[in-house]
Amino acid sequence: MSTASLLNMSGIVKKFSGVIALNGVNFNLEKGEVVSLCGENGSGKSTLMKVLTGVHPFGSYEGDIYYKGELLQSRNIGDSEEKGIAIIHQELTLVKELSILENIFLGAEISRHGVLDHSAMYKQTKALLTRVKLDVDPDTPVRTLGVGQQQLVEIAKALSKNAEILVLDEPSAPLTESETEVLLAIVKQLRSEGVSCVYISHKLNEVKEISDRICVIRDGEHIGTQDAKQMTTDDIISMMVGRELKELFPREEHDIGEPILKVGPVTAKISKAANLYQVKDVSFELRKGEILGVAGLVGSGRTELMQCIYGSYNGVYECPIELNGQSIKIRNPEQALSQGIAMVPEDRKRHGIVPIMGVGQNITLAGLSMFAGLGQALDESAENRAIKESIARLKVKTAGQELAIKSLSGGNQQKAILAKFLLLEPGILILDEPTRGIDVGAKYEIYKLMFELVKQGISIIMVSSELPEVLGISDRVLVMHEGKLKGVLENQGLTQEQVMDCALAEE
């Protein structure tokens, strides 16, 4: 590594309870450069950046970090920010009830003679928002902003600390395509201004577009760093997973039976008073052993439709359902589960896991009654067997079943959530954005599992914002737009253009 680099990390070793998370990793960054950090979930990418930014303080790891030629020994995140190194985590850290201005200057308020200088902070915030191309008033409450706008506020906040190195951990995971384009344009602009960026993403098209170099980590070890122009997507994937994936979507032949679920017409509103429909007069059928994809732009009503079926929609709705020819009523998730309908939610952090509980406890949480009769004590040995079998079946990477699930990578959390619902042996499985924020290797395993399940006769409804995924996995595709069902397309040579034409077609 060049000693003249802006940043040099050498021989970084980090352990958690004796488990090696990083094993002698080297990483360097030049001024005004974007280096993408790639690897599977749990490979050590975020851990390496937490070492850099003081989340894991000096003394808790081995190895050396040199920044501008001097040894960096950050005791906390404040130390690294003071030096000009800022991180934007995958989970946004803004205080939603405060304004943009208040968030940016939180803990670093400007005052004159003991009185907050709102005028000075307003002026600086306005300049920062202009820099990140966000045309909103600095006094706007953060809770009124969309996710993409909140992401830009996070970047503005980092720049307010005069960051020379900006670490972006999965910044585009919750963003729409247009919001992602804005984000990438801002990163390119920052690079031209001399700001160095570390970009962590599983979206390899973004990685190829934005990077000067690409660094790959696998199982806590540095596999290699290469010029982005010299690497193909297949090269990146092979380095990440340690093998060549012949295809990203491992389609397998499976038998599809008669319709087992008839839904609709579904109508959903935010409230009785509001005349704003999230879903309007949507009806469809699901066949036995089928993967039914649901496509549409963000805000098309896909998730709300699934919530109505599962009984978890918070507003006012009507959702007639026939299951195996019998009319049923579902008004809450418990009733859905009793009918053999399970749903893996879009937001796994908020609705899929109990963060402080162990991996094993999360897996068996929905099915504890399976391990105890009425009034009887829990059969812990039976529960432990089920947990071990589930962890092995879903290939959940964890140091142990007692480890808090929040400590796992996003992909392994997703596998644990799937394990939880598969333990209940559902006949119908709804997957809302099942591969969001997880790497290509974990995606591949989830796709393989989905085909394994439909071969067993389980029917799957999959909502996804990624059209290549919908087309690569689904047997049929429901196309939604602005709360309405615009078409049901057989997936035989179906193209992205045909799906979008259907979504945007005039009625």
Image: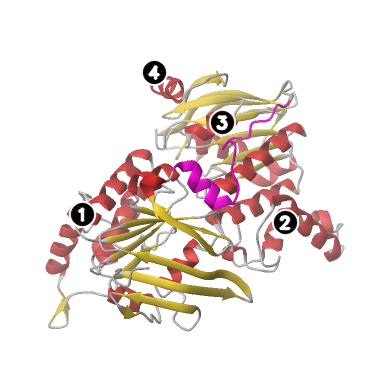
Separation of marks 1 and 2 at Cα, in angstroms: 46 Å
| Quadrant hosting residue 15 | bottom right
Colour mapping = secondary structure
Residue denoted by label 2: 391
Separation (CA) of disc 2 from disc 4: 45 Å
User: Can residue 295 be seen at all in this image of the molecule?
Assistant: yes
Q: CA distance from mark 1 to mark 4?
A: 40 Å
Q: 448 and 406: which one is in front?
A: 448
Query: Label 3: few (<14), some or many (≥20) within 10 Å?
Result: some
- Answer with mark 1 or mark 2, whichever residue precedes in sequence: 1
| Residue for badge 4 | 505
Q: CA distance from mark 1 to mark 3?
A: 37 Å
Q: Is residue 2 above or below residue 449?
A: below
- Which residue bears the numbered disc 3? 472
User: Looking at the image, which residue is at 19% across and 61% down?
Assistant: 125
N-terminal-most mark, 3 or 2 = 2
| Left or right of 469, for residue 115 | left
The prevailing secondary structure element of the residues shown in magenta is loop
* Amino acid type at image mark 4: Ala
Between tags 3 and 2, which lies in front?
3
Q: Is residue 206 above or below residue 309?
A: below
The image quadrant of residue 333 is top right
Q: Which residues are magenta?
A: 232-254
Residue 22 in percent (x, y) is at 54, 69
- C-beta proximity under 8 Å, tags 2 and 4: no
Q: Which residue is mark 1?
A: 192
Query: Percent x, y for residue 331?
Result: 63, 41
| 238 magenta-colored | yes
